[in-house]
Amino acid sequence: MRFDNAFIRDLPGDPETGLRQRQVQSACYSRVSPTPVAAPRLVAASAEVAALLGLDPAYVASPEFACVFGGNDLIAGMEPFAVNYGGHQFGNWAGQLGDGRAISLGEVLVPSGRWELQLKGAGPTPYSRRGDGRAVLRSSVREFLCSEAMFHLGVPTTRALSLVATGDQVVRDMFYDGNAQAEPGAIVCRVAPSFIRFGNFELPASRGDIALVAQLVDFTIHRDFPELEGDRTAWFHEVCRRTAVMIDHWMRVGFVHGVMNTDNMSILGLTLDYGPYGWVDNYDPDWTPNTTDAQGRRYRFAAQPQVAHWNLHRLANALVPLFDTTDPLTEGLELFVREYQRLEQLTAAAKLGLEDGTLFDELTGLLAQAEVDMTIFFRGLANVDGPSLEPVREAFYRPETMPLLEPWLARYAALAKPGRKAAMDAVNPKYVLRNYLAQEAIDRAEQGDDLGVQELLEVMRRPYDEQPGNERYAARRPDWARHKAGCSALSCSS
Ligand code: AMP
Ligand code: MG
């Protein structure tokens, strides 16, 4: 592997080394090595990401691979570091946060491009505050599987190369009720062209370090947006546009991020930081998977477009000193709104398989009222060829609510044209990473059975295909999962 570690080469670093917890001024990162683990063992790997990186499958299966991607060894060219950033959490400025448990190994240059490799859960850094720098298996399975599932759904996202069990125990209080327990630890290797977040710009801006904001902006444009070299306005507009694209995809597939803090917003418009995320089962605009957010529901499903706009506004505020007037920034925020509205209309029409999305808003109101599974309903809609609800029957959690949809369906059937199925099936997935499916794979993995993770990954590689024999992965959330931890709601404990 050929490394070209631009981030640490071209940006200022922390002169101090070691793990002392500290405020790091005037620097974008601190050098820090992964802390070795007891017995690294590969649980699962993404063949597609390995191929992107030019890694031989035999190497990926070898003990050497588990050693490197479990944090016990470095390959020549790797120069590990943790990144310094801040962020707005749940609407409030939180100050310096930084990579408390992520350690980047370096940037590889391969024919498919530049990829930063980052271990999540590889031990403490100067940004760990009171945390241990580790991650439990359950949250690592979720991040690993969802990164790849999202990619195959066509949603912009960071990727995941590997999931390695560490052989160490990690203590977590999952329900925040004073019952801490030891759980198996794990490390995911995340892969993306860049892990720069809105919060990377906000932190130096909050400290009045305008020179560093400018340097980071120009570095980001040069490395990650080379076609926009020298044009900070065009760059900010592009960030707004990409964020709109990402959110539109989330709404299309029923993904709820759960923690849209500005430190979790990628400057590349990639879905980043899979924590207490979730998938909408029954269509519910107010649903949030995050128990920490259960009261305010700031990050509920339907709020994601507005939250993205709010987050872009925080980024814009950090960039104000770089511009003569605020006009370019205001224009970017307006561009986000326009672009999102345009995409929302296109997506509504595409999901319905109609010329336009006029019927969509009325439908989502009914879906929420009647408790209908989002994924099954839209998939089934392609088979509707008359006023009968039969093709979408499976989507109803309570069959007695079916009549609520009848008038709408009659209008839909009158407009829907034959021959629309292939196009609809390409935007309405059959398989999504339902919360209960991930939990089943986790339960098996915690018993030492890795196959559940591997099988689920395999199904999620082809979410738009029918996949005869795999229908059970497309089933409605079973009743037992309705209120079960991990299936209906998740804490941030990870
Ligand atoms: P998150 O909610 O996962 O995006 O994390 C928010 C902040 O907390 C980031 O700065 C993380 O690095 C940090 N953090 C979360 N969990 C841990 C942990 N176990 N050890 C150290 N830092 C952590
Ligand atoms: Mg985060």
Image: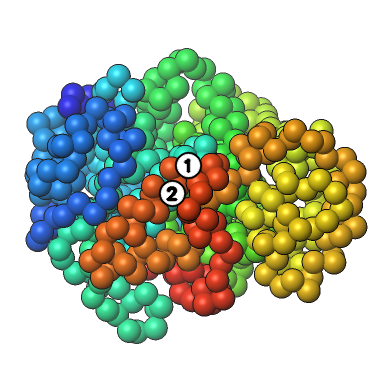
* Residue 471 in the image, given as x and y percentages of width and height: 52, 56
Checking the image for residue 459, the label placed there is: 2
Quadrant of the image containing the N terminus: top left
Q: Nearer the viewer, residue 463 or 209?
A: 463
Q: Distance between the residues labelled 2 and 1?
A: 6 Å
Whether residues under marks 2 and 1 lie with C-beta atoms below 8 angstroms apart, the answer is yes
Judge from the rendering whether residue 412 lies leftward or rightward of residue 53; answer left or right. right
* Residue 8 shows in this picture: no
Three-letter residue code for mark 1 = Arg
Query: Relative to 284, is 13 above or below?
Result: above
User: Which color mode does the image show?
Assistant: rainbow
Query: Relative to 169, is 390 above or below?
Result: above
* Residue 434 in the image, given as x and y percentages of width and height: 51, 59
Judge from the rendering whether residue 402 lies leftward or rightward of residue 219; answer left or right. right
Q: Which of 13 and 311 is in front in this view?
A: 311
Residue for point 35% across, 65% down: 442
For mark 2, give the secondary structure.
helix
Residue for point 53% across, 65% down: 289
Q: Is mark 2 within 8 Å of ligand 1?
A: no
Three-letter residue code for mark 2 = Val
* Residue 445 shows in this picture: yes
Q: Residue furthest bottom?
A: 178
For mark 1, give the secondary structure.
loop
* Residue 314 in the image, given as x and y percentages of width and height: 55, 44
Judge from the rendering whether residue 470 lies leftward or rightward of residue 101; answer left or right. right
Label 1 sits on residue: 462
> Where is residue 394, by image quadrant?
bottom right
Q: Nearer the viewer, residue 352 or 75?
A: 352
Residue for point 32% across, 52% down: 454
